[in-house]
Image: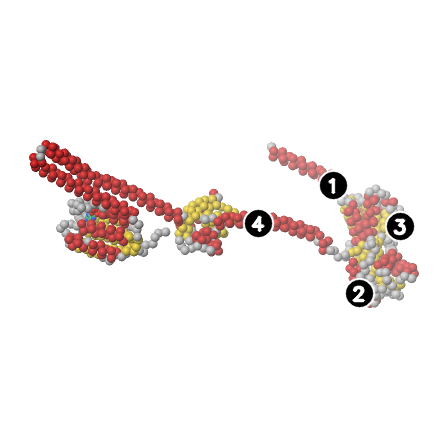
Amino acid sequence: MDYLFTINRKITFILFLYVFINFFSFSQESKKILVINSYHEGYEWTDGELKGIKETLKSKFNNIEFIVETLDRKRFSYLDEDKYFSLLKNIFKFKFQNIEFTGIFILDDSAFKFILQYDKELFPNIPIIFCGVNYFEDEMLNGHDNITGIVEFVDFKSAIDIIFEVQKDVENIVVITDLTLSSRINRKAINNLSNEYADKVNIKFIDEDEKGLTLEELISKLEKLTRKDAVFFADFFLDKNKKTFTHETILTVISPKCNAPIYGKGDTSLGFGIIGGRLNSSYYHGVTAAEILIKIINGSSIKNFPVIKKAINKNMFDYKQLNRFNINVVPKDSIIINIPKSFYKEYRKEIILFFILIFILIIFIIILSFNIIRRKIAEESLRSLFESLPDMVKIHDFEGNFLYVNKNACKTMGYTNDEFLALRHYNIDDKEFSKGFKNRLKKQLENGEASFEGVQVTKSGKKLPVEIKTKVIKYRGKKAIMTVARDMTEWKKAQREKEELLKLLASKNKELESIIYAASHDLKSPLLNIFGFSKEMEVNFEKLLKILDNSDSIDNVNNNDVVNIKEDYIKSIKYIISSIEKMDNLLNGLLSISRLGKSILELKIIDMNKLIKNVLESFQYKINDKNAQIKCKRLPDCTGDVSQINQVFSNLIDNALKYGKSNDELKIVISGEEYDNNSIYCISDNGIGIPKDKQAKIFEIFYRLNTEINPEGEGLGLSIVKRIVENHKGTVSIKSDAGKGTKFYISLPSPNKREED
Ligand code: ADP
C-alpha cells in the first residue's frame, strides 16, 4: 500500500510540474525579432549594429528570438534591384506568413530602401526601426507611420577636435581619402572645416591633387610623416589602380609604416591600426535602435520617436597604438580596447579555484600531519613500553615479515635489529612449529588474539621453548600481528628439576620406609634376645638368692645348682653380647647410609684402571685365599667422587669373592666401555648367581640371601652401591641366573658428558 501511495504521489507531482512549466512557457511566449541586414554577416559595420541590438534586447528580455535576413548587397550589387527586391518580398511573404514579429530592425541603406517599398504589404503595423542609413530625407517616411530610426551621420568636427585633446602639439592633420563618391563627399565636408582650424592646424589631403594614389604611393607618403603630424583616415576603399580594400586590409598594411598616429571616423576601423578618435559606433547605433523598440514594447507609441539625425559616436581608442605613440592622455569617458588584462583579471576564476584547492589541501595536510604526529606519539610510547618489557615483542604482517622487534627479542634471538627485520617467521620458528603458521594466523584473525606454545631457534641454533600470546593490531595504518613471546627455557629446566626432586623425594620416602621397616624388624630380634636372656638371668639370679637363703653357709650350697645357674648366666651373657654387637652393626650400617646422603661429592675425573688396581690390591689376601682368577680389562675414565666410587667397586668385588661356588674355580672379570657419554663398567663372576625374583630386592637395605654362605653379612653392601651410583646420576643393573654367575653393570658419567642445559 505504501508503495502504491508513493507512486501516486510521484505521478501527481510530475503532472503538476508539467502543467506549471506549460503555463510558464505560455505566459513567457518568445518575442520574435526580424533583422534585415543590407549586407552580409562579416561586414563590420552591420555586424556591430546587430551586436548592439542583440545584447541590448537580451539584457532586457529572457525569451527573445532573432531571425536575421541578409540582402548581401555588397557582394551581389550587380543584381537588378527591383527584381531582386520583388523576389525577396515574395519569399518573405511566404516565409513569415504565420509569424507575428514584435519588431523589425533595418540595417543600412539597401534594406531601408526595400522596407520603404514593401513594409505595408509584408509587415503592416509592426514597429520598424532602421539604423546606419546614410541617405535619408524626411519625405521618405511619408505614409510610413510605423518606421523610425537613426541616420548615420559623420560628425567630422568632433572627429577632428578630439585629435587636439590627444595630440596637443599636432601641427598637420593629413586626411586619407580615395576617389569613391562617398569619399569625395567626405573630402568636401572636411575641406569646408579646414578654414575653421586654419590658425590652429594645417589640414591637408594626402592625395593633394585628388587624382588618386596607389597603395605604394600612399605608404611612401605616410612613411615621411613625423610625430608632429596626425593622420585622419576618412576612406580608402579603392586605389588608383582600382584595387579595392576593406578597412581591415588597408589599415593593417599602412599602420605599421605610418610614423604618425592614424585617427578614424568609425569604430569598424578600430583594432586594425588606428589609434582611435571620436568614432561613429555601429554598436551604439544598434544599442540606440534597440532601446527605441524596448520603449515601444513597454507601451510608448512609435510616433514619440522621431528619426535621430545626429552622430552616434564615442571616444574610442586602441591601447596598443596609444602605447606605440607614447600617448597617455585621452578623454575620461573613452572606451579603450586591447588593454592588456592583468593575469589576475584574465584567470580570476582559475586563481580563486586554485587557492581554494590549495586551502583545502593545506587543511588536509594539517589534519593528516596532526594524525601522523598523534600516531607517532602513540607509537613511540608503545615502543618504549615494548622496549622495557622482559619478553620478546615482535610485530609481523600476515606473511610473517617482521615489521618491529624489541631489544629483548634481538638479545634473546641473537640478531641485530636490522638482521631481524630482514627475516620472516620461518627463519626463527622451529621447523615443526613453523608448519602451523597458517592455522595459527587463521585462529588469530578469527578471534583477534591467541596463545600457544612453540619452539624458536636462535641465530646460534639454540632451541628455545616459548610461550606466545598474540593480538591483531593496527600498525602503521595496516593490520598486523603483535606477538609477545616468553623464553620458557629456565621455567622448563626448573620444572624438570622439580619433577626430578619429587621423584627423588618419593624414592627417599620409600627408602626411608624400608629402612624404618628393616631397622625395626632387624633390631627387634636382637632386642628380643637381650630381653629374653635378661629375663632368664633375672630368674637365675632369684634362684641363686633362694639357694643362698636356704643354706647356712656357702659350703652347704649345692654345687650342681650353682654350676647350672653359672652355665645359664654365661650362655645368657654371650647371647646378650652377640645381640648387642648385632644391633651395633645394624646401627653402624644405618649411620653409614645416612652419612652417604649428607656427604658432598667431590667430583673429579677418575682413572678407573688405577682405582680398580688399588681395590684389587686391598683384596689380595682374600683373592689368594679363594684362589680366585681376576681379569681386569682396559677401563674408560669416569667422573665421580674417588672415595665413594672406590666403595662401590670394593663392595661389588667383595661380593663376587664372597658368593662363589664352593667346587668351581672362581673367575672374576672387570670390563668397561664408553657409550652415549657414559662409562659403563661390568663386574662379572661365575658364582652362585641370584634368582630372578630376588634381583630387585637385593638392593634394599639389610636384605640378604645366602646367609649360610656369608653369615657375617649385613645386607648393606648393595644398598650403599645403589645410593652412591644414583648420587652420581648413574645407574646399577644386574644380569644373573641362579647358579650361573652374576653381572653387575655400573653406569657413571664419562668425563666427556656435558651438564645438560
Ligand atoms: P651382604 O653381602 O652383607 O649380605 P649385600 O647387600 O652386599 O649384603 O648383598 C645382599 C645379598 O645379595 C647377599 O646376601 C647375597 O645373597 C646377594 N649377592 C650379592 N652379591 C652377590 C654375588 N656376586 N653373587 C651372588 N649373590 C650375591
Q: Position of residue 550 (x, y in %)?
A: 10, 32
Residue 182 shows in this picture: no
Nearer to us of marks 1 and 3 is: 1
Q: Earlier in the sequence, mark 4 or mark 3?
A: 3
Viewer-side residue, 328 vs 85: 328
Q: Earlier in the sequence, mark 1 or mark 3?
A: 1
CA separation in Å, label 1 and label 2:
57 Å
CA separation in Å, label 1 and label 3:
40 Å
CA separation in Å, label 3 and label 2:
45 Å
Nearer to us of marks 1 and 2 is: 2
Q: Position of residue 578 (x, y in %)?
A: 17, 42
Mark 1 is surrounded, within 10 Å at the Cα level, by few (under 14), some (14 to 19) or many (20 or more) other residues, namely few
Residue 373 is marked as: 4
Q: Amino acid at mark 3?
A: Met
Return the residue at label 1. 25
Q: Earlier in the sequence, mark 4 or mark 1?
A: 1
Up-down relation of residue 296 to residue 275 (above or below): above
Is there CB contact under 8 Å for labels 1 and 2? Answer: no
Return the residue at label 2. 257
Viewer-side residue, 491 vs 239: 491
* Residue furthest to the front: 553
Is there CB contact under 8 Å for labels 4 and 3? Answer: no
Viewer-side residue, 723 vs 318: 723
Nearer to us of marks 4 and 3 is: 4
Q: Secondary structure at mark 2?
A: helix
Return the residue at label 3. 140
Viewer-side residue, 515 vs 353: 515
CA separation in Å, label 4 and label 3:
88 Å
